[in-house]
Image (cartoon, helix red, strand yellow):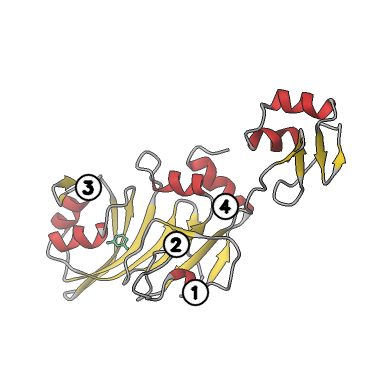
Amino acid sequence: MRLQVAISHAGVASRRKAAMLIEAGFVEVNDKIVREKGLAVDPERDRIKVEGRYLKREARKVYLLINKPKGVITTASDEKGRKTVLDLLPRIVERLYPVGRLDKDTTGLLLLTNDGELAYRLTHPSFEVEKIYHVEVKGCASPQTLEKLRKGIFVDGKRTLPTSITVLKQDKRKTILTIKLHEGRKRQVRRMFEVQGHPVTKLKRVSIGNLKLGELGPGCHRGITREELKKLKTMVGMK
Ligand code: URA
């Protein structure tokens, strides 16, 4: 990041004012006066001083994808001492938070990050990115029932948004399908099918926007790629 940008991001001065301060010799990087506005700095590592005061260093942003196994809870810490998704990770210095929740018995893709802005936007209804779930329900869900669910049904007094459902396999005992959701109400998939008389027996999230579960095994995690992060941010209106 360029020096004057790092200063303006820290909220100390506008970009123009920061450029003037640099030129006038009021800015130090790692204890040396710097007069080069475009100097590349790393706000997480370099010590930047403006008019005698250090800028607060930005926490390194971390983005991890984990395949949550069954029986593990999504919260960052649990007062009852139950196993949480963070217990599945090696010790990481940054405090990470799960973005959106998966029920204890739901498996699949979960994003963990310390990027508050991205987390906020990903869960905000106005940006709510598409999430795809792989679902197994009891019984043979009829075409009429599925059509109702696609159009939207009342769950807890509120209509669900139109959705896309694709049946993958069906017999007398069960229906296996995918459902795409653009909202994240509590236990939404389970409630939608329960209301129609088809309790969910297995639920797995396979994607969040452009992020895919792919071949990530249960309990395993990986960092997101630069390309994935760029697309995700664009999706929620961040540069
Ligand atoms: N819908 C549910 O019912 N449960 C989840 O964990 C996610 C979506």
Q: Is residue 219 left or right of residue 133?
A: right
Quadrant assignment for the N terminus: top right
Disc ID at residue 88: 1
Q: Circle 1 — which element?
A: helix
Image quarter where ligand 1 lies: bottom left
Disc ID at residue 228: 4
How far apart are labels 2 and 3 at the CA level? 22 Å
The reply to whether callout 2 and callout 1 are in contact (CB within 8 Å) is no
The kind of residue tagged 1 is: Leu
Say which of 168 and 205 sits in front.
205
- Mark 4 or 1, which is nearer the eye? 1
How far apart are labels 4 and 3 at the CA level? 29 Å
The kind of residue tagged 3 is: Thr
Q: Circle 2 — which element?
A: strand
Q: Residue at x 52, y 47 (%)?
A: 232
Q: Say which quarter of the image contains residue 84.
A: bottom left
Disc ID at residue 169: none
> Residue 102: where, in percent of width, then height?
35, 63
Q: Earlier in the sequence, mark 2 or mark 1?
A: 1
The kind of residue tagged 4 is: Glu
Indicate yes or no: mark 1 CB to ligand 1 under 8 Å: no
- Mark 2 or 3, which is nearer the eye? 2
Provide the residue designation for mark 2: 110
The kind of residue tagged 2 is: Leu
